[in-house]
Each structure stands twice: as C-alpha cells, then as structure tokens.
Image: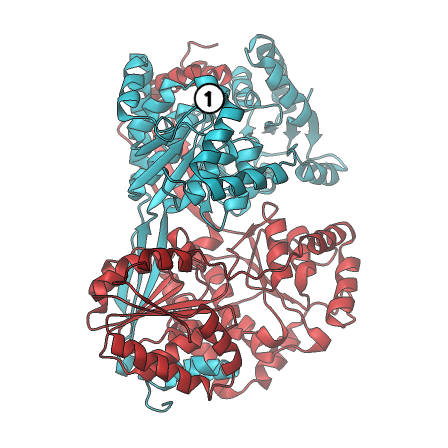
Chain colours: A red, B cyan
C-alpha cells in the first residue's frame, strides 16, 4: 500500500515536508566513464564512435553505413501498420498545430528619446535529437522532440538512435520522417552525444542537443553543456490527480497506474476531499495491478513512492499542488477551471473527468516533455522557444546618444570602468 | 599586438577554426570546496552561513544582522550622489520599459475536434539574486538582474551581497531599492548560494538563482541546479566590431577597449574590409591603452585574445560573425540594418556609428546579461521569460475524447504501455 496522509491531522506539515524532500533519483555515478568516452570522440571522431558502437551495441558500422539512408527510412515507413501510421499522423498534425501557436513575435520601436530598440527571435541552426533504442524506443518521443524544432524553423535536425544488435524500431523512423528530421545516425550512448556536440569527420556538430536517455546519456549531456545547449535532464515520471467523490474510482486508478507503469521510481499521487473515495481508488488500483502486463513495475512504484492525501476541501489541495509542482496534474473535479486558475506550479494540467493524462502523452497537441522532480516551480515543458533565441537591437544617432549617453557615462565612472565611459563620451564630443 | 587574420589569405579557414576553438576559461577547480560548503549549509543552516561569513568575509553577523533593514537601504540611498541616483533612475525606467514589451501572452482555443487547449505563463514565485561585493560591485548588474524579475511579476526577490570587512557599496543598495528587491542579506560565496537554494532558519529558499559571481559562486550554482533553476554561467566578456573605413579609428578603438578593460581574459575583435582602417584602429588602441586607468588589464586582454580580421567585403563578415556568435556585436557601417538582417547568432546588436556597446551596458534598456563563449548560437540574454514558466492545459469531454482517444490507444499499445492505453480506453467504454 502507498502512504496515506491526512492534511487535517497533526503532524501533517512535517510528513508532507519529508515527502517533498524524498529523492527518487537512484542515479549511478558514470561521470568518469562518460568523460573518457567524450574525450576520445573529441580526439578521434568517427573511429572512436564506430569502436564504441561495436563494443556497446554489438554492431559493426562504417562511416558510411552509420547514416540511415532515405531509402531505409521509406522502407521502414512502408513496413509499419496502417493504423499505427495513421495514429502517428494524427499526433504529428495535432502537435504541429499546438506548437505553431507558440511562435513568438519580436518587436521594434523608437522611444521618446529617439533610440531605436528591438528584439528579434531566430531559430537555432542545428539541433541534435537523442532517441533511445531497444525497449524504450518511443515514436511519440521522436514527434515531441522534433516537431517543436521543425516549427521553430531549425534547418538541420539530426537524430541519433542506437541499434543494439542491429535492431531499429520502424515506427521510430516513421516518426522521424513525419517530424522532418533531416539526418539520422545509428548511434547511441555518450558517444552519440559526443559526436553531436563536437562533430566527427562524417557528422557536422550541432548547436543544441535534446531528448531522453539513460544515465550515460544524461551525464554526457551535462558534460557537453556549454559547448552546445541542452534541454533539461528528465527525472522519473510523475502524476498528481486531484479528484472529488464523483469520479469512477476505476478511471482514477487507471490514471495513477499509467504513470506508475513507466518505471519503479515513477510517482503517482492522489489528493481527494473524500476518505471513502480514497479507499475506493486504492482498492481499484489493487484490482488493476493484478491484471496489468507491467504490473510488477507499477506495483513497486505505487508502494514505494505512491501517496494518497485527504484534504478537508478541494481548495486545500492548492498549496500542496504548488509545493509538489507536478509534471502532470489531473483535475478530475466538477469545476476544474476554477481550481486550475489558483495553481501556479504544474507542467501540464488535464482538466475534467474525460482528460486522462495519457491523451497528452500522444495526441492532444501540447508537449509531453515536461519538468519533473518539482522543477515546474521554475521551468517549462519543451516548446518552440527552446529551439529559438533572442537578439536585442539598439540604434542611437548623435541626438539620441546625446540624450541618454550622459547617464551611461555617470554610471560607468561610478563603477570605475573608464574605457566604458570613454567610448560614450568620445561620441558626445567630450571624451576624445 | 593582437593577432591579425586576412579572410582572403590561404590558411585562413584553419587559423579561424583554431581561433574559434580557443578556450579563454582559466577556471580553477573548486568543486570539492563548494560541495563541502553547500553540504554544511544544507545541514546546519544559519550557523554554517554565519561561520563561513566570519571566515571568508571577516565579518561577524547574527541571524538578525545578516539581513539589511529597510532603514539601512534608505540611508544608503540618501548617501549616494544626486547625479548617480538620477542616472540609476534613468537606467531603471528604460530597462523596465524595454522589458515590459517582453511580457508573453498565453492562449486558449477549442480545436475542430472539440478539444480545449491552452498555454498559460506564470511568474516564478521566489528568485535569488547573487550580487558580487568588493571591487566588482556593479549597481548596473543589480538593475539588469532584478528588473526582469520584477516585470515578470515575481513576488519575492531576494538579494545576497557579501560585505568583505563590512564594506557595502551604497549604490548597490540604491539599485536594489529601485529594482524592487524585497529582501537583502549580507552574504556571499557558495554559502549564499546554498542559503538561497536550501533555505536556512532565517532565509526561506527560492526557486531560481541568477547573477554573476566568481568561480566559487559559479560552481555552487552548477551544483544546486535541479534543486533550483539558474541562469547561464557567464564566461569572460566579448565584443565584435564590424567597421568600414568611414569610422573614426579612435571611436572604434574606444569600443574595443571598453570590453578589454573588464578582465585579462575578455576578448575584443575587429572585422573590417579595409586594411588601412585596421592599421589605424590598431594604432588608436595603442594610444588609448597608454592613458587608460585599467590599461594594464586591457592590454593583456587585447594582446592575448584580441584579433583584427580583414575581409574582402563587409558581407564576408556574416559567416564569421555567426561562427563567433558574439555576446556584443557592433555594426559601425553605412547600412547596419541590412547587415544585421543577415546575421543569425549574436546576443545584442549595436547598430550604426553612434551606438557604442557601453550605452547598452547601462541605459539603453535591453539586458546586459548576455550569452558569452559562442553560446549565442543557442541561448539568449536575460529577459522576462527567464523568470516565468509555462503550463499547458488540455480539456476533453466524452465526445472529443471519442475523436482523438483511439489514436492515443493505438500508439500506447504500439509502445507497450498498456496502462496508458487503458486509462483512455476505459473512458471510451471499451477498457473497463
């Protein structure tokens, strides 16, 4: 059974604080290994990448065959089931449509002092997309990572995907085709991240790397950060469901388990204002666990990290939600908009009784790459802006510099930066 | 003399690549020290923070006196020169005005399938602003870091500033007052970062930490990343000036030196289409170096990292600019807008002959916290969006879930995630 907490009970504050402080990151220390791999890839390029691929993925490639050809992508696409392609197309179109609305506007204006000011957005030139291979090869993740880059206008989208023992999921290639990926390489692990960041004889370097991966990939992204940009490092998945008594306990149990099945360190939390409903949902979870294909994993997650919290009234859930800052928040209540308006911290919010979180994982349109481990307090899900950057623009003429320049000179002198002051003053005719 | 390169000469490509690859980061390894400081602050709170402050800043404080009172801030404000306060007020008003234009709009709409979709921006709840003390105590940095947070609507802006030997620059406090800082503590170093990230008995933790600092502060920010958000880690300052022959060499030299005076690892680069102008600018730099108060620092930067590159025509500068991806780009040419439109990578662009970079450091309005070390390829200067985050919203009803749900079920099954599929299917009436 997962832990039960009652927000009305004595000692709740301390229990809840301990719950928040719990670390689900059972990361292994792979820093040294990754440093060696990256350094060899940087020095030797293709040779190192091919060697590591032979060793870790048991596949012999050449500089030529490591790239997946357009013909291979087309063949994979043709090999997929028609239903699956149709579903991917629905997802791709809906993701594209939602993300197009995120395209930002720059601005430019002349202010009262005659200074022309502006802000301009531009797409990153080249992006690398890491896609896990083997068991965790998710075509939905290809769409969610590549479509925002495509919408942003990134001209070059490079995907790497390992092919352990030569196996490559055709749906992953189909998703890449739909999402506008421009190059694909059969590479994985820290060596793929190194190839994307530093470039090799065959692979030109990119400017930013995104996408999920195992501990080695996450550490490699951390280590190349600065040379290239990276997205956030994702932790285990989470769902927080706020539900009143008027829900079907089976529906809510299914939602809790849809995150618990991800991994044994995933976290599912239910907050409800009805203790009887809490019992009914807990019982429904037990019934469903017994028949779920990934029930063993889901049970570990539920028993170790799951929680059911009862609150006196639904509004009492708000401060708890903001402190948990969940990746996924379901509001299965009568007036979800009213409750949602009070909440500050959540990656994605699923409103009402007919919006299971899983619909957002695949086809709703918003991104499923979302902030985990309480980071929704300060960060956002992946979006178009993550593949763009801003330049600011300033233009003075002699008259407008005459108006604002003296204040700059005063501050530069106050800070002891005389060359700064002089570069303004010389144009005001009193510093040459 | 700085290096000279000619884009028309044989071997230029290799020379330029080597120039780009040069690492100006002479960082010391402070990882272990910082880890110990953070861990003690986390465990002991106030006691550790006060102890480190005694040791590193030679100041004895208590939990009470470490906070700067409103009366102390007002007294500092009153002690500043009227000119300086007036200049700070000009700067604060202009920064606020430019940043207000960055406030983002969310959106919400119902799509053709009847799904309600939305995106909502909200401010981070609490931000920590690290301000260096002593020599590098820059009131302009206080404005540039705090004003975007204020404009974003951050309710709690906490500043820490060390007071080595008890010294605190009154202009820094005056800037904090103008910028809407809500709490100030006399703390610095890794211990201040730890106090902001983990909280102590006296200081409530924040959600994001921004602001410049020495190697210890930068490493502390790296280590607390994840617990809190951080801004980018700034490298040494840079300027790239593209100038034609019709400039006064003294003006351009002054601009090159305005960055070189920052530190001996700063970098100033001139690109010009006229070799005679290159010589004239180089000579002007030498003349000004001889009389500059910070001439010794500026000379080291200029001779070690400075460069003058001649190009056949101004348009040939564009690919070089994009590869350098400068923090500051000055376009001192006849038609700067035309040249600017061709450039993808630059933190801030200063257009025309009357826009010295230093005017942007203080009063123009755009932020002076900008991406360094080629990171303008994938990142942006500090702005309002850095103090906000997005939540996405999805609402289905039975009918709209009926339309998009089946594709989600297909993809979940294809990915082997049956609990995901089930949470949708159960609501479609075929999964219970």
- The one nearer the camera, B343 or B211, is B211
Residue B184 picture location, percent across and down: 35, 30
| Residue B113 seen | no
The quadrant of the image that shows the N terminus of chain B is: top right
Q: Which residue is denoted by mark 1 in the rendering?
A: B59
Q: Considering depth in this image, is B354 or A24 the residue closer to the camera?
A: A24
How far from the left and from the top, in percent, is residue A75? 63, 81
For label 1, the SS is: loop
> Does the image show residue A306?
yes
Q: How many marks?
A: 1
State the residue in front, B9 or B33.
Answer: B33
Residue shown at the point (44%, 43%) measured from the top left: B197
Q: What is the x, y in percent for residue B396? A: 29, 76
The quarter holding residue B75 reads top left
Which x, y percent locates residue A321? 32, 60
For mark 1, name the chain: B
């Amino acid at each position: 059974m997962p832990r039960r907490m009652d927000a009305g009970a004595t000692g709740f504050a301390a229990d809840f604080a301990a719950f928040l402080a719990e670390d689900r990151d059972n990361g292994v220390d792979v820093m040294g290994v990754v440093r060696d791999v990256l350094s060899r890839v940087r020095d030797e390029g293709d040779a190192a990448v091919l060697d590591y691929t032979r060793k870790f993925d048991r596949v012999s490639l050449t500089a030529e065959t490591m790239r997946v050809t357009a013909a291979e992508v087309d063949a994979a696409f043709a090999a997929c089931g028609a239903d699956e392609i149709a579903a991917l197309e629905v997802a791709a179109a809906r993701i594209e449509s939602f993300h197009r609305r995120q395209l930002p506007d720059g601005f430019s204006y002349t202010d009262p002092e005659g200074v022309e000011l502006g802000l301009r957005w531009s797409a990153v030139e080249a992006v690398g997309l890491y896609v896990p291979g083997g068991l965790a090869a998710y075509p939905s993740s290809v769409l969610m990572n590549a479509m925002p880059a495509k919408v942003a206008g990134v001209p070059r989208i490079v995907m790497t995907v390992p092919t352990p023992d030569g196996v490559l999921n055709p749906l992953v290639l189909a998703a890449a085709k739909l999402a506008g990926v421009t190059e694909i390489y059969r590479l994985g692990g820290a060596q793929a991240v190194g190839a994307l960041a530093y470039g090799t004889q065959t692979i030109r370097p990119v400017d930013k790397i995104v996408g999920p991966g195992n501990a080695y990939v996450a550490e490699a992204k951390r280590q190349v950060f600065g040379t290239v940009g990276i997205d956030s490092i994702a932790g285990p998945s989470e769902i927080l469901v706020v539900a009143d008594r008027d829900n079907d306990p089976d529906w809510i149990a299914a939602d809790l388990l849809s995150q618990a099945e991800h991994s044994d360190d995933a976290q599912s939390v239910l907050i409800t204002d009805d203790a009887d409903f809490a019992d009914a949902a807990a019982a429904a979870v037990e019934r469903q666990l017994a028949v779920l294909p990934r029930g063993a994993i889901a049970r570990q997650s539920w028993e170790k990290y799951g929680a059911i919290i009862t609150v006196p009234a639904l509004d009492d859930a708000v401060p708890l939600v903001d402190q948990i800052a969940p990746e996924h928040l379901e509001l299965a209540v009568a007036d979800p908009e009213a409750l949602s308006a009070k909440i500050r911290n959540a990656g994605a919010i699923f409103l009402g009784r007919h919006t299971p979180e899983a619909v957002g994982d695949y086809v709703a349109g918003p991104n499923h790459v979302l902030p985990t481990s309480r980071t929704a307090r300060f960060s956002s899900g992946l979006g178009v802006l993550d593949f763009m950057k801003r330049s600011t623009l300033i233009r003075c003429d002699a008259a407008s510099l005459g108006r604002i320049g003296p204040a700059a000179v005063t501050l530069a002198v106050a800070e002891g930066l005389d060359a700064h002051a002089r570069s303004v003053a010389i144009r005001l005719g009193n510093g040459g």
